[in-house]
Image (spheres, rainbow, N blue to C red):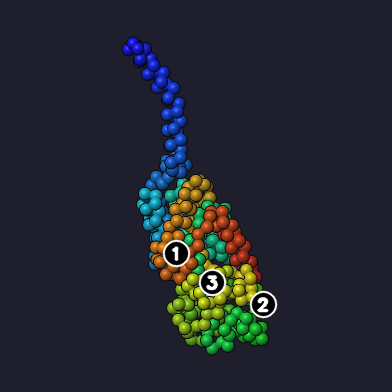
Amino acid sequence: MSTRVRVVANIVAALLAAPGLVAAQATSTSSGQAPSTSSGHAYPSKPLRIIVPFPPGAATDITGRYIAQKLNEALGQQAIVDNRPGANGTIGLELAAKAPPDGHTLVIGQTGNLAISPGLTKVGYDPVRDFAPISLLIASPHVLAAHPSLPVRSVKDLVSLARARPGQLNYASTGSGSAGHLGMELLKKTTRMDLFHVPYKGATAGLTDLAAGHVVLMFTSVLSTSQVGNRVRRLAVGSLQRSPSLPDVPTIAESGYPGFEVISWWGILGQAAMPKEIVARLNGEIVKAMASPDAQKRIGALGADLKTNTPGEFAAYIRSERAKWGQAIKDSGARVD
């Protein structure tokens, strides 16, 4: 074969092979492509900010810092916790709602600032329309606690006693419109009990008086009741399943009131217009992080149960919680203290 013929043959072979080569390159690029931001850059293109609407050291803050660490490791970008406390967590949520929807600003939302406060006062965001839920993170069941002097050892006993003495049994809460107040109002409505409300400024004051017998009942967190030990009697928990933190304490649901649930929960969200690909990526990384034994050890120690879900499930849960707590506010006539 002449040199010229050989060159022509090589060119033809190269042209015939080129379409396959281009197609292979395109397939390889699309299969490994990272989600993109609105600017077209691969995600994440800069450090992430996780807004925690509460002070450092709280359970919300500890959870946020754990998520920041895991996202840093998974995404290769620094994730920074930005504490923005105030107004029962609504300041931080309002700030997050106004951030660019590019996946670089996330926020920890919870029962109070997503489901309760919007029904009690004017807030600068809509808890459903302004956010893209990513995943639930943790939940902490409320504990129905009684002073040991009260002659009851179960929900059934309490209901019988309260119905026999309408309006005579009192209960503490951390203030009008708090989760503890509204949770007890839900229980009152469900069980047809008549109890007298004594609001306190914070959990410590209420628990102190409960332990001393000045009030006889309180609906509060697992972590709070651990501070008073055996000076209170734990009658039941408000979760649908028994809490790993209190495995021997029955649920209110199994005590004769199926479906009853009063818990505090925390989850992570972005802005409503955040690309779905980024929401899915973050959900996958966060669910994986929260399923690790390390998460169980570090966050489970707070008295919380680790609970993740899909973005769609979390969105539906927020809507259902808004409806539930909104009805409790209406029924109780609760107002902000």
Q: Position of residue 68 (x, y in %)?
A: 40, 56
Q: Specify the label residue 60 is tagged with.
A: 1
Rendering coords of residue 239 (x, y %) = 55, 70
Residue type at tag 2: Arg
| Of 121 and 51, the residue lying toward us | 51
**Which is more toward the observer, 194 or 25?**
25
The N terminus lies in quadrant: top left
Instruction: State how far apart marks 2 and 1 are (Cα).
Output: 34 Å
- Dividing the image into 4 quarters, which one contains the C terminus? bottom right
Three-letter code, disc 1: Thr
Where's residue 45, x and y in %? 39, 45
Q: Write down the residue under mark 3.
A: 242
Q: Which residue is mark 2?
A: 192
**Which residue lies at the image location 53% right of the left edge and 54% below the top edge?**
311
**Tag 1 or tag 2, which sits nearer the N-term?**
1
Q: Position of residue 115 (x, y in %)?
A: 56, 63
Q: Residues within 10 Å of mark 2 (few under 14, many from 20)?
A: some
Classify mark 1: residues with Cα within 10 Å, few (<14), some (14-19) or many (20+): many
Secondary structure under the numbered disc 1 in the rendered image: helix
Q: Quadrant of residue 301?
A: bottom left
Count residues near mark 3 (Cα–Cα under 10 Å), then give few for <14, some for 14-19, many for 20+. some
- Label 3: element kind: loop
The Cα–Cα distance between marks 1 and 3, rounded to whole angstroms, is: 22 Å
- Residue drawn at x 35%, y 15% is 7
Residue in the foreground of this view, choosing between 269 and 34: 34
Residue 119 in which image quadrant: bottom right
| Residue 94 seen anywhere in this rendered image of the structure | no
Q: Nearer the viewer, mark 1 or mark 3?
A: 3
